[in-house]
Image: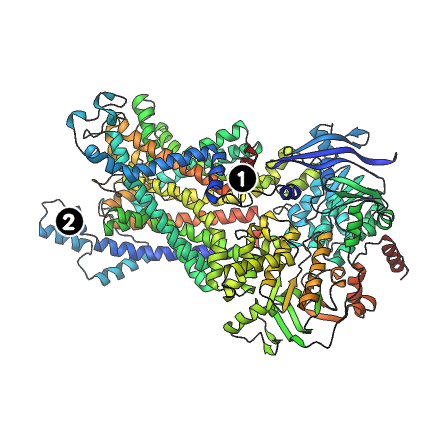
Amino acid sequence: MSQASLAKPPRSAEKSAAATVLSMLWRDKLAFVSVIVLLFVFLCALLGPALLGDLATDQNLRGRNSPPFDLSRGWAFVLGGDALGRPMLARLIYAARSTMLVAAGAVIASLIVGALFGLVAGYMGKTVSQVIMRLADVIMSFPSLLIAVVVLYVLGPSILNMILVLAITRIPIYLRTTRAEVLEVRERMFVQAAIVMGASHWRIIGRHILPQVAPTLITIATLDFAFVMLAESSLSFLGIGIQPPDVTWGLMVSQGRPYLGNAWWLAFWPGLCIVITTLALNLLSNWMRVALDPAQRWRLEARSTTDE
Amino acid sequence: MNDALLEVRNLSVDFHTARGTVHAVKQISWSVGRGETLAILGESGSGKSVSASAVMNLLDMPPAHIVEGEILFGGQDLLKVSYEEHRALNGKRIAMIFQDPLSHFNPVYSVGWQIIETMTAHGRPADQARARALELIARVGIPDPEAALHKYPHQFSGGQRQRLMIAMALMLKPDILIADEPTTALDVTIQAEVLALLKELQRETGMGLVLITHDLGVVAEIADRVVVMSKGEIVEQGTPREVYHAAKHPYTRQLIGAAHGKGEINILDIASPVLLEVKSLCKTYGAFTALNDVSLTLHRGQSLAVVGESGSGKSTLARAILRLEGVDSGQAVWKGRDLIGMTARDVLGMRREIQMVFQDPTQSLNPRMSVYQIISEGWDIHGLMPDRTARQAKVAELLEQVGLAPEHARRYPHQFSGGQRQRIAIARALALEPELIICDEAVSALDVSIQAQVIALLDGLRQRLGISFLFIAHDLGVVRDFADTVLVMKAGQIVESGPTGQIFSASQHPYTQKLLAANLDPDPDVQAQRRLRASDG
Amino acid sequence: MTKLIGQRAVASLLSLLVLMVLVFFLSRLTGDPAVLFLPIDATEEMKEQFRVLHGLDRPLLEQFNQYVLDLLQFDFGDSLRKARPALDLVLEAYAWTLPLALLTMTFVITAAIILGSLAAFKVGGFFDRLVSIVSLVGASAPDFWIAIVAIMVFSLSLGWLPTSGVGSVAHWILPMAVLFIRPFGLIVQVVRSSMLSAQSSAYVKTARAKGVKNLRLIFIHTLRNGMLPVITVIGDQAAAMLNGAVIVETIFGFPGVGKLMIDSILQRDFNVVLAAILVTAVAIFLMNILIDIAYGLLDPRIRQ
């Protein structure tokens, strides 16, 4: 097989990186759709509130619990109206912002802190590593719901505190992964080769170890984004997460719960939004696992060359 | 051949991969008779294992696809029998052993359980299987068979595992044993023992042996007939003597030409100044002694080989000199200054002067850096050659020096073959214009023909640039054409040292002699003479 | 093996200590329980009485000493809410949570191993795709939403199952079904990929060369190796369930430890919270040891 690969040098090196990624994405239709869904959700979160103006917050008592798929009140009410007569569609777009903000904030914060400590734990000597790992064990053995409740009680339930809470509970995931990967990579021959050339610790970490570890971390972060979204919505559902007037999809489900008998759409749509988004994240993460692994990437790469 | 037990006829197998269809083997035919040993010789990617996998029904289909051919055994075509019929033959009439016995044993079951399973899988009673297992474990030379039965694969050494693998294969006295590179992962002295065991067992049972190998020496030692494979085709066949002395196909001739141990021996120039002097290095890991009072002297322009089997401490020596590992006591004086006691700042200066080439180029090159980045990294580290155009020119020059093209600079390591990757690693070492290059098993992961090319490259660099080499190897044959001085290590100690010619013609220490004897010569006549002498003595 | 268990014990003990201290100060610093528990029109005297009764009037350090001493004797004090020993309440709740968790986990493990192995047996086939999709959706859906939708469909629309409470077998169906989905989705994915990698390993090739039968190949040679990563995930999921299925128990009014914990937290009944945490920690610790032992039984390389 090595014969074949030599005879036909892959052209990926010549193509721009973005084009390669796009063509690999196109090979996996589910991942492609996932990216579009996620882009759409992010755009809603980013631009939605500004475009909607007061539509999402104006109460309209005559539109209370108006049923979905009825266009007589305008497009905004296509998914029905909520208990205060606000259009569901507008509420969903409006809630996307806080939902995404909390999840993204928590993932980024825990990724940075976890990866940093994981690098240190993996690269430094045994004692430092042991201390950091025991700390991670302690965090892991706390019931995460309890951490959440405790911190939110002390600091008060705000979006920022919500991010803090979720970030703390997710740090061990990145820490452990990073450490395990660093331990493996630092024994690899090319790291030894860099040491022989006289490379500094910073160069070895930055140029040789981090680039190998990063793909795994990004893949996990994608998966974790879904997990954090679910955790946030659970907390908000229990009433100890996001508080009105802020709103997330999880809180919307909670708010719709009393109306289960007569207005199912209040709780149904926001839950569906959560499912679709987390499903897309899961699918994307599965794709990344293949695409970012040089040993497996050919599955996506090569087929795209035969297409051309 | 009418007395053939197993015959492969016109077999063609394709692999349908994402990169397109690869013709793994094309119309190959071979056969093996009772008591006969057939060697299938080829380098990596030659398709030498494919036909054996087809015989055992081990090909995954897809991606494999058998295009045409027959495999005749016991009057039937194995490609036409049902899965169940084929299964009944595997292990019972035809058995197979593999290259890496650690991964080919199931890690979670005891070896006894696995050996016994060969018989119980074919409906034999367990107590009978157990008795036979004990008998065979003793036969293949494992001490205390009763205890060995209950141990797990990871509790044995590599050589023992391969012996156990052989015992497992022979449980039902198969007519044919297929051995896929059975000794490649083993030390030379262990290799000799395992080959001898295979031969004895063959004599006892009269089985046909199909031996897949890349090593001409193994062929010369054990084969009755040999087929040479290249790019999926059989390019040559005959007895080992015919093939060795009268090869017709250019590939075979190239392969035989590449076999080491035939060139002129380098002579050391004692007049050149001393570059490195290692004095009484000692290093222990717990109870294990890695280095025991090791001393050596290396002159400018010298190529010094350190030869030893696994666990001899040869790699620890290299790592200690490079300050990759600390030592317990001793000195390594580099141009008048002791490396062992150097401060971190001074070590950085030393890092420019001593470079290293590692065993496996697949692992020693960062997969996410381009060749240009890999070669120029040393300049970044030491703040050399700030000018970009000068750098590009120098990288191009280095690539040409090691036999690659300047345009390769933009590519990534995975786009090269193993030999090319090792050339990149050598270019990286040369970039810093070192005075000493330490090669740690730098050619042992490469195919034989590639080995010869890389060694020729290193020798050329030594002559042209006056670089000194410390060449670490497990194989005496490899160092013969390159080194001017040889050190033989065993269990952390240097047991013998001297000029290459002296070591090869008049070695004093019994261990060196054992190594030399175990080192198989590619010439079947030489091997036959050695065997004769051994049986006389 | 023993070292592994020792490490676990140290980590669990450490986190328990941190928790104990944390819970103590939180319970004293985040508001006055007297205000929370007594009626709004309670007099200052009544509040004072309440504080004396629960030792809340003494200096903080003295309270802490007493608290630690009590804990060492497994005395968690009384529940402020129900005026009964906190430990009793927790153990009663566990009597509900434990069967729920054990039963659900048994179903999850059985289904995930069988379906995951079968999916891996024929990769890319119809069954494999079906299992992949179902498991992905299962792992992606928030349990509170599934619970709500399930109530909507099976209780409100169809009227087949009760919405909440305990008392009959029917009351257990919805909580178990909802609890089942996420762990099943996660574990089945791990089973599938781990069986796949075990199947392509070298020792399976050896077994095939020995003439071992197909079923034996899957269930004797691959399954035991493939189970190793699966066990870790099972442990994580089981631990989460022992923590109390807070959401599911709340929605279905199931009197388990999760519901008890969240109710106690919301009402600052910290003695109960503490007791619940300690009991849970012990349960999780024991389960982790079981997991370690299972690991050791499956893989001889761990035993040394």
Q: Is residue C215 visible?
A: yes
Identify whether A38 is placed above or below B133: above
Going by the image, does A256 lie left or right of B530? left
Going by the image, does A271 lie left or right of B231? left
Residue A32, by quadrant, is top left
- For residue A301, the mark is 1
Identify whether A74 is placed above or below B421: above
**What residue is rendered at 28% in x and 34% in y?**
A93
Quarter holding the C terminus of chain A is top right
In x, y percent, where is residue C213? 66, 34
What's the amino acid at mark 2? Val
Q: Residues within 10 Å of mark 2 (few under 14, many from 20)?
A: some
Quarter holding the N terminus of chain A is top right
Total tally of numbered discs in the picture: 2
Q: Nearer the viewer, residue A194 or B388?
A: B388
Residue to which mark 2 is pinned:
C35
In x, y percent, where is residue C142? 35, 36
Which residue is situated farthest in the bottom direction here? Answer: B336
Q: Nearer the viewer, residue B477 or B271?
A: B271
Mark nearer the viewer, 2 or 1: 1
Q: Numbered disc 1: what chain?
A: A
What's the amino acid at mark 1? Glu
Q: CA distance from mark 2 to mark 1?
A: 66 Å
Going by the image, does B150 lie left or right of A88? right
Q: Numbered disc 2: what chain?
A: C
- For residue C32, the mark is none
Secondary structure found at label 1: helix
Residue A85, by quadrant, is top left
Going by the image, does A245 lie left or right of A299? left
